[in-house]
Image (cartoon, helix red, strand yellow):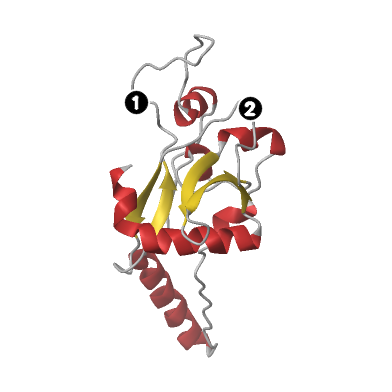
């Protein structure tokens, strides 16, 4: 994806971090046969300074066949046909502010202290492990600047860009 070049520096450091945590497996050569390598892209994070990597699991966009003339179906398309998920509800700042006001009002009336906890859920998705039989479907190739060559990466967790992760 063309967007990858916009965030290449932050994506490169994030890949190294994820390899260190065991969320990505790194290989010097093709780890599986057959293999499905997903195109990678980048989107700007809300801090408007760094980018996060996304996988385009909607590819191929057109009709494509493998070497055995079997039609290739995009991972997200195949998932949508077999998995009905409820509409995703996301908490936003307005919801949090409203709830805080209500709880603070009740707490003030009852003489209670309101304590709030928040955290950056940066790696929350990564607790959702993929079964090893799915690894060959979640691969990508990326340039390793230290080795100055291409390396193969396998996502062992459900990362960004997968339809089935957005509703969990």
Q: Secondary structure at mark 1?
A: loop
What whole-number distance in Å separates the C-alpha atoms at marks 1 and 2? 23 Å
Q: Residue at x 52, y 38 (%)?
A: 164
Query: In this view, which residue lies farthest toward the top?
Result: 69
Q: Position of residue 36 (x, y in %)?
A: 53, 31
Residue 100 visible (yes or no): yes
Q: Position of residue 159 (x, y in %)?
A: 52, 48
| Rendering quarter of residue 2 | top left
Q: Residues within 10 Å of mark 1 (few under 14, many from 20)?
A: few
Classify residue 156 as left or right of residue 122: right
Front residue of 84/124: it is: 124
Residue 123 visible (yes or no): no
Q: Position of residue 45 (x, y in %)?
A: 35, 62
Q: Residues within 10 Å of mark 2 (few under 14, many from 20)?
A: few
Q: Taking 139 as reference, is 148 above or below it?
A: below
* Residue beneath disc 1: 61
Q: Residue at x 37, y 16 (%)?
A: 63
Q: Which mark is residue 89?
A: none
Q: Taking 134 as reference, is 117 above or below it?
A: below
Classify residue 134 as left or right of residue 163: right
* Residue beneath disc 2: 33
Q: Taking 150 as reference, is 109 above or below it?
A: below
Front residue of 12/117: it is: 12
Q: Residue at x 42, y 70 (%)?
A: 99
Q: Secondary structure at mark 2?
A: loop
Label located before the other in sequence (1 or 2)? 2
């Amino acid at each position: 994806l063309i967007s990858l070049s916009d965030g290449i520096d932050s994506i490169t450091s994030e890949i190294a971090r994820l390899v260190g945590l065991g969320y990505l497996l790194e290989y010097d050569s093709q780890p599986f046969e057959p293999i499905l390598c997903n195109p990678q892209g980048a989107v700007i994070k809300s801090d408007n300074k760094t980018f996060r990597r996304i996988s385009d699991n909607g590819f191929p966009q057109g009709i494509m066949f493998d070497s055995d003339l079997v039609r290739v179906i995009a991972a997200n398309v195949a998932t949508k046909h077999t998995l009905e998920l409820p509409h995703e509800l996301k908490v936003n700042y307005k919801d949090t502010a409203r709830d805080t006001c209500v709880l603070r009002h009740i707490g003030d009336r009852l003489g209670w202290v309101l304590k709030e906890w928040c955290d950056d859920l940066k790696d929350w998705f990564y607790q959702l492990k993929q079964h090893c039989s799915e690894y060959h479907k979640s691969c990508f190739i990326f340039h390793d600047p230290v080795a100055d060559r291409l390396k193969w990466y396998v996502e062992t967790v459900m990362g960004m860009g997968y339809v089935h992760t957005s509703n969990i």
